[in-house]
Amino acid sequence: MPDWLSRDYVGPPFVLFGTAHLGTLALIVTSCLLLAWFCRGPAATPPHKAAIRYGLAALLPATQIAWDGWQIVAGVWTIDWSLPLHICQLAQLLSVVMLLTRSRRLFDVLYFWGVVGVTQALLTPNLSMHGFPHIAFLAYFLSHGVTLLAVTYMLTAEGYRPGWGSLGRSWLALHLLLPLIVLVNLATGGNYWFLAHPPTTPSLIDYLGPWPWYIPAIELIGLGLFVLALLPFVWNRPARAKRRMAQ
């Protein structure tokens, strides 16, 4: 088995904010900007937008299948960690439904999960030793990056916009899922959503105190970040609406 697929990887380890990490982040940001530019331009005809929408919808599950397939072949798939129950994986799978159905309700949820949750996961990945070009590195950043591309598409091609109600629905969806994740953790001995203990790799959670005190801290910070992610769309909205009506 080639090293980039090997369980016992001996290539370059992942380095937080190293060259590979920063380069990949730059590529994801550039891809989102280019997608937004294209979707707002005259070349974005309905057939072109449909091709992008279906392409993203196909790419998202493909990355999950590749990731699960490698884990199974490498013998590292475990029920206490590998189920697609992490927030970013849930966002990835729900993004497929959002793209296929152009669901505004799912967009309301996934805008915040994407901008806040996926972005944080990209900045502090839980990758340990798997650096570029290992499949774990590629699958991780591709899946998270395409989730952001899906949200970017809905913002620019479909013209969807979040509001205060969107924030409430997204926050409610998280807390409706929370009891299920707790039960799964108890049943499997897992650490989904990092509810059992902090991640073993560097993350923002390291600065929020020991378990369980970092959990309410995450709640407060997450809510604040949700509000910040919403502000560009609600700041001075009545004044902007009056200006449009006057034009």
Image (spheres, rainbow, N blue to C red):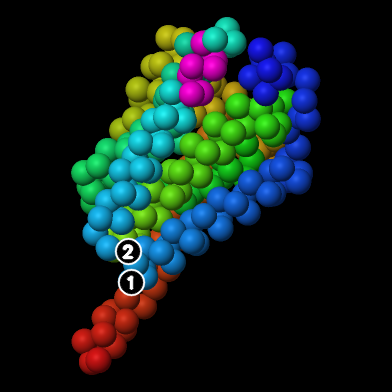
Q: Mark 2 points at which residue?
A: 44
Q: In which quarter of the view is residue 163 placed?
A: bottom left
Q: Which mark is residue 42?
A: 1
Task: Please provide percent x and percent y for residue 132.
Answer: 69, 34
Task: Please provide percent x and percent y for residue 65.
Answer: 43, 23
Q: In which quarter of the view is residue 30 placed?
A: bottom right
Quarter the N terminus occupies: top right
Q: Magenta region, mostly helix, strand or loop?
A: helix
Residue drawn at (26%, 85%) of the image: 244
Which amino acid, by three-letter code, is at mark 2?
Answer: Ala
Q: Dot 2: few (<14), some (14–19), or many (≥20) neighbours within 10 Å?
A: some
Q: What separation in Å lies between label 1 and label 2 (alpha carbons)?
A: 5 Å
Residue drawn at (72%, 25%) of the image: 129
Is 143 drawn above or below residue 187 in the view shown? below
| Residue interval drawn in magenta | 66-72
Task: Please provide percent x and percent y for residue 218.
Answer: 53, 41
Q: Is residue 70 left or right of residue 209?
A: left
Task: Say if mark 1 contacts mark 2, CB within 8 Å.
Answer: yes
Residue at the extreme bottom of the image, as rendered:
246
Q: Can residue 163 be seen in this view?
A: no
Q: Dot 1: few (<14), some (14–19), or many (≥20) neighbours within 10 Å?
A: few
Task: Please provide percent x and percent y for residue 171.
Answer: 35, 45
Residue drawn at (36%, 25%) of the image: 179
Is 31 drawn above or below residue 66 in the view shown? below
Of residues 50 and 60, the one nearer the viewer is 50
Is 127 drawn above or below residue 2 in the view shown? below
Residue drawn at (31%, 49%) of the image: 51
Check residue 65 for magenta coloring: no
> Tag 2's secondary structure?
loop
Is 207 drawn above or below residue 181 in the view shown? below
Q: Is residue 115 left or right of residue 157?
A: right
> Tag 1's secondary structure?
loop
